[in-house]
Amino acid sequence: MKGNPQPSDNIIASKATTIEIFTQITLHLRGYCQF
C-alpha cells in the first residue's frame, strides 16, 4: 500500500537514518578503541 508519503513517515525515516548513522559511528569508534 504505497501512496504519497506522509510527512510523519518522512520524519520517522529520517530519525531511523540518523540512529543508523549514529550506531555505525559508535560501533566504528568502539572497534577503533579496542586496538
Image: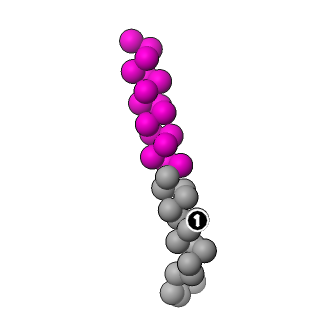
2, 34: nearer the viewer: 34
Q: What residue type is labelled 1?
A: Ile
- Which residue is tagged 1? 12
Horizontal placement of 32 versus 12: left or right?
Answer: left
Q: How many marks?
A: 1
How far from the left and from the top, in percent, is residue 9?
A: 57, 73
- Which span is picked out in magenta? 19-35
Question: Does residue 26 show up magenta in the picture?
Answer: yes
- State the residue at coordinates (44%, 14%): 34
- State the residue at coordinates (50%, 40%): 23
Q: Which quadrant is home to the N terminus? A: bottom right
- State the residue at coordinates (48%, 55%): 17
Kindly state the secondary structure of the residue where label 1 is placed.
helix
How far from the left and from the top, in percent, is residue 33?
A: 43, 17
**Dividing the picture into quarters, in which one does residue 29 lie?**
top left
Characterize the local packing of mark 1: few (<14), some (14-19) or many (20 or more) Cα atoms within 10 angstroms: few
Relative to 19, does residue 14 appear above or below in the rendering?
A: below
How far from the left and from the top, in percent, is residue 27?
A: 47, 31
Q: Which residue lies furthest to the top in this view?
A: 35
Dominant secondary-structure state across the stretch colored magenta: helix
Q: How is the image coloured?
A: one colour
Q: Which quadrant is home to the C terminus? A: top left
Relative to 3, does residue 18 appear above or below in the rendering?
A: above
Question: Does residue 22 show up magenta in the picture?
Answer: yes
- State the residue at coordinates (48%, 33%): 26
